[in-house]
Image: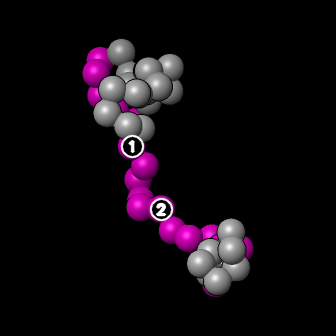
Amino acid sequence: DKPGEHDFKILKKLVLSDGSVLRARYPGRPTRDCLFNDPVMDGK
């Protein structure tokens, strides 16, 4: 999001009523289908 243009409907789904925030246990990893893609050379 750009500053001042947040989607509060989505943000409210990530925050619990006690103010804590839902977080993933582990960092994201690339999937097999995008691991060897080159968006610069493929034009995507």
Q: For this rendering, which residue is in front, 40 or 12?
A: 40
> How far from the left and from the top, in percent, is residue 34?
65, 73
Q: For this rendering, which residue is in front, 31 or 5?
A: 5
Q: Is residue 33 found left or right of 9 in the rendered image?
A: right
Secondary structure beneath disc 2? Answer: loop
Q: Is residue 10 found left or right of 35 in the rendered image?
A: left
Q: Which secondary structure dominates the residues rendered in magenta?
A: loop
- The range drawn in magenta is 18-36
Measure the C-alpha gap from mark 1 to mark 2. Answer: 11 Å
Residue pictured at 28% horizontal, 21% vertical: 19
Secondary structure beneath disc 1? Answer: loop
Q: Residue furthest top?
A: 17
Residue 23 — which label?
1
Pointer 1 local density, CA inside 10 Å: few below 14, some 14–19, many at least 20 = few
* Quadrant housing the N terminus: top left
Q: For this rendering, which residue is in front, 37 or 14?
A: 37
- Tell which circle, 1 or 2, labels the residue nearer the N-terminal end: 1
Residue pictured at 43% horizontal, 49% vertical: 24
Magenta stretch containing residue 15, yes or no?
A: no
- Identify residue type, mark 1: Arg
Vertical relation: 31 (above or below) 38: above
The residue labelled by disc 2 is 28
Q: Is residue 10 found left or right of 26 in the rendered image?
A: right
* Quadrant housing the C terminus: bottom right
